[in-house]
Amino acid sequence: SYLFQEWKHDYIEKDELEKVNLQQQLSSLQLQMNPHFLFNSFNTLSSLISESPSQAEEFVEEMSSVYRYLLRDNEQNLTTLAAELDFISSYFLLLQTRHGKGLTLTMNVDKQLLHCQLPPLTLQLLVENAVKHNVVFAEQPLNISIETNAQNQLMVYNNLQRRKIRVASNGVGLSNILAKYEMLGQKTPTFQDGGQRFTVTLPLME
């Protein structure tokens, strides 16, 4: 009937509009990441140039690798766990150039889950968040672990050794991760502060 056709047309238009709005929101979150990450990278590089030119050169090489991933995969809503782990390995080398033995990273991930997906740069945000808010010294190392559990979830945790002086934050971080999962219609990641350890549990998507 005419009324049914009108209803169907309006429904399709509304559905398409919601999809466009969702994509715009995701794009907005992704655009947030570029200046955020760029700002932090150049701050670190600026310090290294004066402190250790040889380390600065190594940092630039790793930064190039990291940015290739950022430009390629951050245009997508999802990336594979395998790609994200490769990226975080390069990103960790950037951090280790700066912090040395004050920072460790261990990964224990079920290889059968490497095809699963998650929003790109999720791990980078979590690692950066841990470094930003905790003391990182060779005699008091910050230990970050990434592993999968029996429920096929990804767990990222670090020991808590909070900085005495509160670090300025631009608000991009955990809220960005929550927003991406919500917009993708996925289960919400969980954050747990156990006093001695901070744990983030991330759903993986097939």
Image (spheres, rainbow, N blue to C red):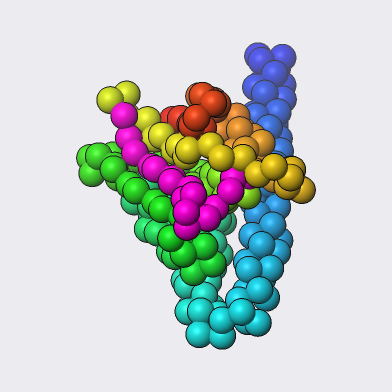
Q: Residue furthest front?
A: 139
- Quarter of the picture holding the C terminus: top left
Judged left or right of residue 3, residue 134 is left
Residue at left 65%, top 82%? 50
Judged left or right of residue 46, residue 185 is left
Magenta-highlighted residues:
133-149
- Quarter of the picture holding the N terminus: top right
Which one is in front, 2 or 92? 92
Residue at left 54%, top 53%? 136
Residue at left 69%, top 57%? 36
Q: Does residue 120 appear in the picture of this structure?
A: no
Is residue 59 one of those drawn in magenta? no
Judged left or right of residue 154, residue 52 is right
Judged left or right of residue 76, residue 165 is right
Give the number of callouts: 0
What is the x, y in percent for residue 143?
43, 46
Which one is in front, 182 or 47? 47
What is the x, y in percent for residue 182?
60, 29
What is the x, y in percent for residue 165?
74, 45
Which one is in front, 42 or 73? 42
Is residue 143 one of those drawn in magenta? yes
- Up/down of 7 relative to 145, above or below: above
User: Image quadrant of residue 177?
Assistant: top right
Q: Does residue 41 appear in the picture of this structure?
A: yes
- Up/down of 116 relative to 153, above or below: below
What is the x, y in percent for residue 30?
64, 51
Residue at left 56%, top 85%? 53
Which one is in front, 54 or 107? 54
